[in-house]
């Protein structure tokens, strides 16, 4: 049997590209969809204590805190005031990007390894 010549440029299989596209979409969704987290508490005298619910962004690390609201701790929970706390941590955003690249690299390696293993077994 003749062996195929070595590849001259970087190539991936179509099935690998499709799997990586779905994984990349999931990673983007995880990073840009807002989660809700209790961000703090303030006491009012007299009156009920209040807590702050803020929107957070980022996976696996939170890199942005968005607007939230102060609300009393006793029911019913009316909205008191909207607080804009747009804080971005670029270091955590960078770590999230590195984690995403690592996940995509592992997916690429596993998919291509499986395809190469199948081809090797077929040629034996």
Image: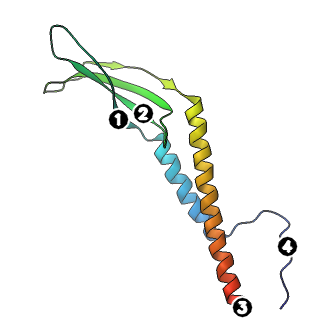
Mark 3 and mark 1 lie on one chain; the one further toward the N terminus is: 1
Residue 93 quadrant: top right
Q: Do the residues labelled 3 and 1 touch (CB within 8 Å)?
A: no
Q: Are marks 4 and 3 in contact (CB under 8 Å)?
A: no
- Residue with the mark numbered 2: 56
Q: Residue at x 71, y 91 (%)?
A: 124
Relative height, residue 123 to residue 99 (above, below): below
Which one is in front in this view, the residue at disc 3 or the one at disc 1? 3
Could you tell me how far apart the alpha carbons at marks 4 and 3 are, in whole angstroms? Answer: 19 Å
Mark 1 and mark 4 lie on one chain; the one further toward the N terminus is: 4
- Residue with the mark numbered 3: 124
Q: Do the residues labelled 2 and 1 touch (CB within 8 Å)?
A: yes
Mark 4 and mark 2 lie on one chain; the one further toward the N terminus is: 4
Question: Which x, y percent locates residue 88?
Answer: 52, 27
Q: Residue at x 39, y 31 (%)?
A: 55
Q: What element carries label 4?
A: loop
Q: Residue 108: which numbered mark, if any?
A: none
Mark 2 and mark 1 lie on one chain; the one further toward the N terminus is: 1
Q: Residue at x 52, y 50 (%)?
A: 27
Residue 47 quadrant: top left
Q: Residue 6: which numbered mark, if any?
A: 4
């Amino acid at each position: 049997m003749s062996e195929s010549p070595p590849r001259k440029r970087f190539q991936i299989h179509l099935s690998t590209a499709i799997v990586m596209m779905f994984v990349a979409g999931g990673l983007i969704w995880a990073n840009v969809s807002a989660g809700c987290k209790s961000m703090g508490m303030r006491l009012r005298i007299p009156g009920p204590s209040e807590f702050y619910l803020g929107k957070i962004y980022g996976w696996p690390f939170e890199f942005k805190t968005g607007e939230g609201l102060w609300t009393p701790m006793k029911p019913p929970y009316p909205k008191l005031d909207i607080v804009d706390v747009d804080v971005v941590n670029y270091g955590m955003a960078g770590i999230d990007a590195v984690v995403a690249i690592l996940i995509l690299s592992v997916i690429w390696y596993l998919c291509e390894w499986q395809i190469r293993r199948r081809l090797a077994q077929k040629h034996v």
